[in-house]
Amino acid sequence: MPIQIQLIDNNTGRPYTNVEDLHIKVKIVVIDGDSELEGLDSDKFNSKIVKQREGKGPLLVGNTEVTFNQQGVGTIGELHFTDNSKWLRCGKFRLAACIDSERCGTTMKIQEGLSEKFVVKDQRGKPYEKKYPPEYNHDVWRLESIAKDGIYHKKLKNSNINSVQDFLNLLNANPERLKEILKMPENAWKKVVKHAKTCPMELDRANLENNANPQSN
């Protein structure tokens, strides 16, 4: 079930729905499980964000940006971790939702939202790791924004797009068709396209040569 974020008016405790002119975007970030955010300013909040360990890809991948609708509700799409949480002192993560005020063009102070603490284990995350860079023969769910057996993965499989190569072939031939198949948010689309295009150029050239010079029987 998708996770929803509700914008609440701190004065009334009721949902805040007057967001039409704010163009609010929410970033989903990872926070150390020991962190408390109440009363923190933006700089101190940013210092609590957990980054990936050296030599690893982004800690949290998928739809990490959420847009509020006119009812003040935002829905988090597909997210998953690429690393466990045991390397932190408390061994737990939290998810936080925060507003990028500069990008949203608003001076309104909006308090960050914070999840409960939770553990991320190796056996859960490892089979779903993304690859940096991906290779042509990798499963398509190795790309960012596409979770294994998630809605986007299923849409691609239904269109016979099973590998990174299949994805890139359609991206090069008919990007609008690929975009129509996925129907994902623009920021997620940009991430998956950017990731796919990091495939090694040597493989790209070899594939083009094979397509241009098919072997005869």
Image (cartoon, helix red, strand yellow):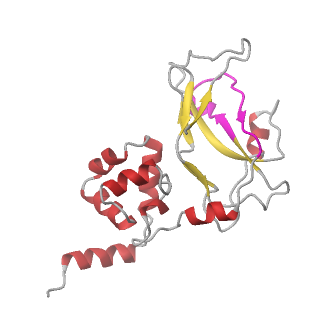
User: How many badges with numbers are in the image?
Assistant: 0
Q: Residue at x 47, y 51 (%)?
A: 150
Quarter occupied by the N terminus: top right
Could you tell me residue 146's position as x and y percent? 47, 54
Could you tell me residue 176's position as x and y percent? 28, 47
Q: Residue furthest top?
A: 12
Can the viewer see residue 6? yes
Q: Nearer the viewer, residue 158 or 172?
A: 158
Can the viewer see residue 129? no
Could you tell me residue 10's position as x and y percent? 73, 17
Quarter occupied by the C terminus: bottom left
Q: Is residue 13 above or below residue 36?
A: above
Q: Is residue 186 above or below residue 122?
A: above
Q: Indicate whether residue 102 is drawn in magenta.
A: yes
Q: Residue at x 74, y 57 (%)?
A: 85
Q: Residue at x 66, y 65 (%)?
A: 123
Q: Which residues are magenta?
A: 96-117
| Residue 59, quarter of picture | bottom right
Q: Residue furthest front?
A: 1
Q: Indicate whether residue 152 is drawn in magenta.
A: no
| Residue 88, quarter of picture | bottom right
